[in-house]
Amino acid sequence: EIVMTQSPATLSVSPGESATLSCRASESVSNKLAWYQQKPGQAPRLLIYGASTRATGIPARFSGSGSGTEFTLTISSLQSEDFAVYYCQQYNHWPPRTFGQGTKVDIK
Amino acid sequence: QVQLQESGPGLVKPSETLSLTCTVSGGSMSEYYWSWLRQPPGKGLEWLGYIYYTGSTNYNPSLKRRVTISVDTSKNQFSLKVNSVTAADTAVYYCARWAPPLDYWGRGALVTVSS
């Protein structure tokens, strides 16, 4: 099973600043990497797929990069609605399509 | 706009079977995979398995023997059964469309296992 490790567990950021979230795979997942945002009491929402392609309707301040085993989600100029938990997920290997444990972005 | 909605009992007794249905609206089930995931309170996401619209399935090996996913395209629905449940199966259960990736999600259904 591919293990996805996200860091940091919590990231405290002031509104307007940028945030950089990391995701590492235990072996290569090529570019088959997605990022999801989850707010309390809500289902996850797809942000990025294919490591760097924004999903429909996702603002340009969200960007993804990386391939192989190292991936990054960058949120530039954080807005109040961006404070949430972010999960990465690999979909290169089955079973199963594993998720990272999440990074919580909270207000500094 | 594709929408998914989970339905089913919110309380299940230990050793019994958890059953949930996901109704898909706003689009066809054809050419996609349909997934079930869960999230225990305060924890991360776990993929339970998925089904292609033709009926072929793939399950997470950690739960394989207890999980069954089925589809009824005539009703635009797919279903989840988890048998022999314990308190560890208490979670919010989500259905989602696997494009890939998981691009449309239901709101989630909290299922509590308790006597």
Image (cartoon, grey):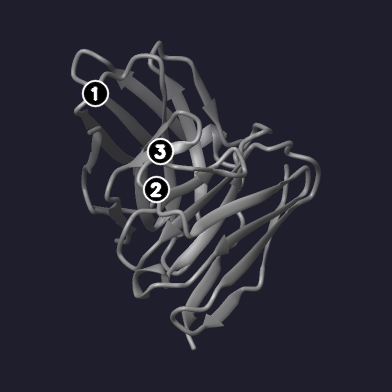
Q: Residue furthest bottom?
A: A108
**In the rendered image, which quarter is residue B20 located in?**
top left
**What amino acid is found at the position of numbered circle 3 in the picture?**
Asp
Kind of residue at badge 1: Gly
Residue under the point 47% across and 80% down? A106
In the rendered view of the protein, which quadrant contains the N terminus of chain A? top right
Image quadrant of residue A10? bottom right
In the rendered image, the vertical position of residue B113 relative to residue A27, given as above or below: below
Q: Which residue is mark 3?
A: B103
* Cα distance between the residues tagged 3 and 1: 13 Å
Q: Secondary structure at mark 1?
A: loop
In the figure, is residue B4 to the left or right of B58?
left
Q: Nearer the viewer, mark 1 or mark 2?
A: 1
Circle 2 SS class: loop
Give the image quarter of residue A96.
top right
Question: At 61% from the left edge and 56% from the top edge, which residue is drawn?
Answer: A100
Q: In the rendered view, tell whether residue B29 sits above or below residue A57.
A: above
Give the amino acid at mark 2.
Ser
Q: Earlier in the sequence, mark 3 or mark 1?
A: 1
Q: Secondary structure at mark 3?
A: strand
What chain is tagged by disc 1? Answer: B
Ranked by sequence position, the earlier of labels 1 and 2 is 2
The alpha-carbon separation of the residues under discs 2 and 3 comes to 33 Å
Labelled pair 1, 2 in contact (Cβ < 8 Å): no
Tag 1 residue:
B27
Q: Which mark is residue B15?
A: 2
Which mark is in front, 2 or 3? 3
Q: Position of residue B58 (x, y in %)?
A: 54, 25
Along the viewing direction, whichever of A93 and B115 lies nearer the viewer: A93
B96 sits left or right of B46 in the view: left
